[in-house]
Structure formats: C-alpha cells, structure tokens
Image (cartoon, rainbow, N blue to C red):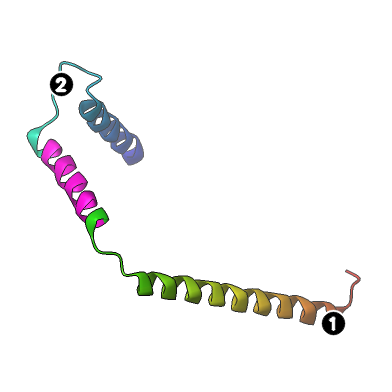
C-alpha cells in the first residue's frame, strides 16, 4: 500500500500549495522551494543562447534522423528480398 500513502501525501502537498484547504497553510520550506525553482527557471531563460550550437544540434539531429530511416528501410528491403512477400 505504499503507492496509496505516497498518492495521499502528494495530494495533501498539492492542496496546501493550491490553498484549497484554508485551515492548512503551506510550510515556509515548501514555499522557498517553489520560489527557488521559479528563480532558477527565470535564470535559465535569461541565459545567452549560442546560435551556432543550436544550428549544429539541429543539423546533427536531422542527419541522424535520415541515417536511421535509411537503416530501417534497408532492413525492411532485406527482409522482403530474403523471405519474399508471402507470409
């Protein structure tokens, strides 16, 4: 039943953060974690973007995509040439 307890714990934490239960206030430690996470995301967005690296990653991605599709097509052709079209 560990999954049930974990699910209940997560539900309570989300309720505290959302403020749906007015009797419970979110703990200050939880609020600090949320604030730190949002600050880290803002810092990440403000970082300098390296255009050359971005273009390089896209080119490599598409080259690997083409190479993978050629390999898959070659395997399919080999299968049909070796075993025929009847199953």
Residue 4 on image: x %, y %: 34, 34
Q: Is residue 5 magenta?
A: no
Give 3 or 9, whichever is nearer the viewer: 9
State the residue at coordinates (72%, 76%).
73
- Residue 32: give x, y in percent of width and height: 11, 40
Residue 32 in magenta stretch: yes
Residue to which mark 1 is pinned: 81
Residue pointed to by mark 2:
24
Q: Name the residue rendered at 19%, 54% in the picture.
A: 43
Q: Which corner quadrant of the image does residue 47 belong to?
A: bottom left
The dominant secondary structure in magenta is helix
Residue positioned 15% across, 21% down in the render: 24
Tell which circle, 2 or 1, labels the residue nearer the N-terminal end. Answer: 2
Image check: 7 left or right of 78? Answer: left
Q: Compared to 56, does 13 lie above or below? A: above
- At which x and y percent is residue 61? 50, 72
Q: Nearer the viewer, residue 19 or 87?
A: 19
Q: Residue 64 lies in what quarter of the image? A: bottom right
Q: Which residues are magenta?
A: 30-44
**Height in image: 24 above or below 48?**
above
Whether label 2 touches label 1, CB < 8 Å: no
């Amino acid at each position: 039943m560990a999954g049930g307890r974990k699910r209940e714990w997560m539900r309570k934490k989300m309720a505290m953060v959302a403020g749906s239960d007015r009797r419970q206030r979110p703990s200050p430690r939880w609020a600090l974690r949320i604030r730190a996470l949002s600050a880290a995301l803002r810092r990440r967005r403000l970082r300098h973007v390296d255009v050359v690296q971005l273009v390089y990653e896209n080119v490599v991605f598409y080259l690997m995509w083409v190479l993978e599709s050629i390999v898959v097509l070659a395997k399919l052709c080999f299968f049909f040439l070796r075993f025929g079209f009847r199953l």
